[in-house]
Amino acid sequence: MKNDVLVIRTGAANLASVAAALRRAGARAIVSDDPSRVASAPAVVLPGVGAFGPAMERLRASRVDVAVAARVRRGRPTLAICLGLQLLTLGSEEAEGVGGVGVLQTEVARFPDGVRVPQMGWNDVTPDASCALLRSGAAYFANSLRVTRPPKGWSAAWGSHGGRFVAALERGAVLACQFHPELSGAWGADLISRWLVAARGEVATC
Amino acid sequence: MLMRRVIACLDVKDDRVVKGVRFRLLRDVGEPAGLAQAYAAQGADEIVLLDVSATPERRRHAVATVRAVRTHLAIPLTVGGGIRSVDDARALLDAGADKVAVNAAAVARPRLLDELSRRFGAQCVVLSIDALRRPRYHEVIVRSGAAPTGIDAVEWARTGTRHGAGEILLTGIDRDGTRAGYDLELIRNVAASVKVPVVASGGGATVAHMLEAFAAGADAVLAASLLHDGVMTIGALKRELAEHGEEVRP
């Protein structure tokens, strides 16, 4: 059975890489920023490359922010990547005064001084025991800010760069990764496959 | 901990991978998508694809090449060569690049870096610097014009990151293709002057060279000739780096 996955057109992200990874995992990738399709799609990817302020502005202008918030609240299959994770929070130091989608009750902050920024490259990911989708391994990161405090009710995986940070969060079929699963080799491909399987299960029970 | 990266570099001309050794002609070493995939399977942490062709059709070729490489490649892909505008970059990103590398166009117009990083994020913008050793400093050389610029490479790296570059790809061009080891003084001076990661390029031929580059402050090393010639696989190279205490992705 093929998953149909809607990839949200954010205007800046590396959509082609995300779509190619989904196709390799046997899914059909459809790119759109139509809020009604985002609301109804069986599975949605919120990719993220770019800056918090402009990306949030674009999500609001197309009303996709509301559709994404509703999906995450209801546990509908959703995968947020990199800036995508950050957009789901309450807000970011990168854009003071700009509210995020607000479904993750936490905030995004800069890395401390003394480490390379952006964090660019492969870093170990260590999941909490409660994680079902996330496993230990090396993932590819490309980020200048990060979350350090996981919101209540979510299982977290951790990384370390100038101290511990949240590498990913999961709750049911909702997965938010600070790293790029689409660029994380075989480990990332396996994670995407597990998410697609979870997405199929979730849709079947809806 | 963030790991050290080993990046495979493919110089592409008219949809073929070539490698120039300083005093020799470009040699044809294979087809880009197949080579990129083979290096990824060996354990390459990233692929850099530099378009060195000079034909009027280069952009069409480059976009098609990037699309073919991306279809099977599950690790990051940086593409450089002839990028002069946000539209040039977007065409490559839409074809499957994750980062774009700019060189001559940024020297001519540093605001290009601001435009690219505002649009795509700093982590997407690689500033490629070719530097030549002079008696008192390293001079930025714009290879396409074969023109010395009189610009100090360390100063330019700092300026470039202020304009939004998120990574420096630093080539000591007197070392390029010579297998004499990286220009360590250049790496040391640039790595100490910027916050962004620095990728060392030019002259790396042995594990010892790579260890020296990491010790000098490089976050990643670029390899081309030694891979294309089959001197060493990336897997073997990374195992040796690990034995010497470097944290690398297995």
Image (cartoon, rainbow, N blue to C red):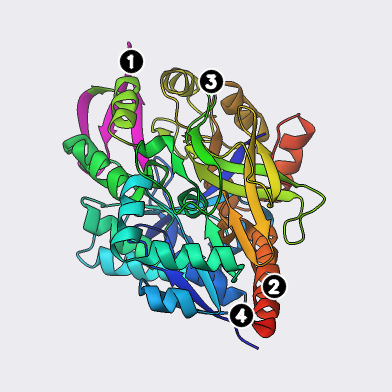
Task: Please tell me whether residue B1 is drawn above or below residue A74 in the rendered image.
Answer: above
For the magenta stretch, what is the residue range?
B126-150
Q: CA distance from mark 3 to mark 2?
A: 39 Å
The residue at which mark 2 appears reads as A198
The residue mark sitting in front, 3 or 2, is 2
The location of residue B204, given as percent across then percent down, is 55, 35
Residue type at the position of mark 4 = Gly
Task: For mark 2, name the chain.
Answer: A
The image's mark for residue A114 is 3
The residue at which mark 4 appears reads as A26
Q: Is residue A173 visible?
A: yes
Task: Please tell me whether residue A44 is drawn above or below residue B211 in the rendered image.
Answer: below
The image's mark for residue B137 is 1
Residue type at the position of mark 2 = Ala
Q: Secondary structure at mark 1?
A: loop
Q: Earlier in the sequence, mark 2 or mark 4?
A: 4
* Crowd class of label 4 (few under 14; some 14 to 19; many from 20; radius 10 Å): some
The location of residue A68, given as percent across then percent down, is 47, 65
Cβ atoms under marks 2 and 1 closer than 8 Å: no
